[in-house]
Amino acid sequence: MIENRSIAVVVPAYRVERQIGPLLARMPAYVDRVFVVDDASPDATAAAVAAVKDPRITLLRHPQNQGVGGAMATGYRAALEAGADLIVKCDGDGQMDPGDIRLLVRPLLERGAEYAKGCRFHHVGELDSMPRVRFAGNIALTFLTKLASGYWHVLDPQNGFVAVGGETLRRIRIDRLAKGYFFENDMLIRLNAIEARVADVPLPSRYAGEPSSLKPGHIALQFPVRLLAGFFRRVFWRYVFYDVSPVALFLLFGSLLFAFGATFGAYHWIWGAIHEQPTQTGTVIVAAVPFILGFQLLLQAVVLDIQNSPRGEREGGPRFLAERDPQERVESLR
């Protein structure tokens, strides 16, 4: 426990037979329960977990692979049933240091946040260790996730090292969370709909050549579509169902005007180019005015959405990291 708050760690595990043992061995003493979810891993992951003699560890097994989101749903339900106050996600591949859990949950304990995410981008010097493909994908997905989720202040929305309060988690339909790698993005979208405060916590990740099941092509094809659907779902629940807001009106009329101006203008420009005739001034005005007005409305909607982003107090990088007990850092790396 920390400050009389029970802490449970959920570890989704798939093909991590080499990494899972050392990870569990580094689990801090203040962690009360550890739920390892073997997501039908074809290797000896389950045996590696069983070899760790720690009474806090509970092994949950899926008969069929459900993806990281499915594994987390199973772990979240188990942690809630165990009465955990704070629940932390820590991947089984060793990229996340369990010794950093104390830092990760601090915004929930002291600063009023309801969800905390580790942020790798505060550690610029350590970004060199991140694979280039993964780094490029994170940059591209970051903007799209900010737009879809409404958490514009979250610097690293793809980071999977997260902590959530048990009461906050109970307000979310866990059974409807995305099953695969879209889980992290879907979680943010659903948190914004209930106006949960989210905080960034500067924490580095470690990359040591561990295998990844992430398929960049699959992400590039599916994530933009799912983020767009999530964006409209969030706007409906946040700005229409729960509270009628100018954001929804600006998005609706802005999109219609912008689309009309762009379509009308493009049609007449192409028609004029084909027939080698100049476009009339009146036609240009009819296309330009709704195009510009629509763009301004969309821009205003984004500005209002940014202002409405539920914020947890962001931690200061160097000062925040310096508060950690140096001996704890040494012991967690053994």
Image: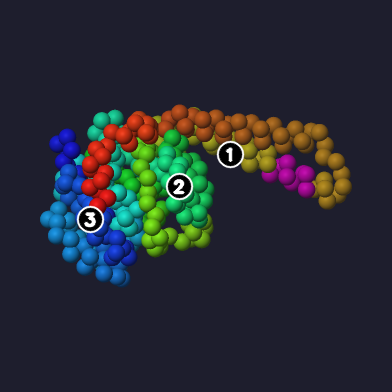
Q: Could you say which is closer to the camera, residue 125 or residue 215?
A: 125
**CA distance separating discs 3 and 2:** 25 Å
Circle 3 crowding by C-alpha within 10 Å: few under 14, some 14–19, many from 20: many
Q: Is residue 218 left or right of residue 62?
A: right
The residue labelled by disc 1 is 255
The residue labelled by disc 2 is 127
The residue labelled by disc 3 is 24
**CA distance separating discs 1 and 2:** 38 Å
Residue 57 visible, this angle: yes
Q: Which structural element holds mark 1?
A: helix
Q: How is the image coloured?
A: rainbow
Please identify the residue farthest to the right as the structure is shown.
276
Q: Is residue 27 left or right of residue 130?
A: left
Circle 2 crowding by C-alpha within 10 Å: few under 14, some 14–19, many from 20: some
Residue range highlighted in magenta: 263-270
| Residue lying at 27% horizontally and 60% vertically, measured from the top left | 20
Q: Is residue 264 shown in magenta?
A: yes
Q: Reading the chain from its start, which is encountered first: label 1 or label 2?
A: 2
Camera-nearest label, 3 or 1: 3
Q: Is residue 107 left or right of residue 129?
A: left
| Residue lying at 62% horizontally and 34% vertically, measured from the top left | 295
* Type of amino acid at the residue the image marks with label 1: Ser
**CA distance separating discs 3 and 1:** 50 Å
- Magenta segment's dominant SS is helix
Q: Is residue 244 shown in magenta?
A: no
| Residue lying at 36% horizontally and 42% vertically, measured from the top left | 203
Q: Reading the chain from its start, which is encountered first: label 3 or label 1?
A: 3
Q: Which structural element holds mark 3?
A: helix
| Residue lying at 38% horizontally and 61% vertically, measured from the top left | 210
* Type of amino acid at the residue the image marks with label 2: Leu
Residue 145 visible, this angle: no
Q: Reading the chain from its start, which is encountered first: label 3 or label 2?
A: 3
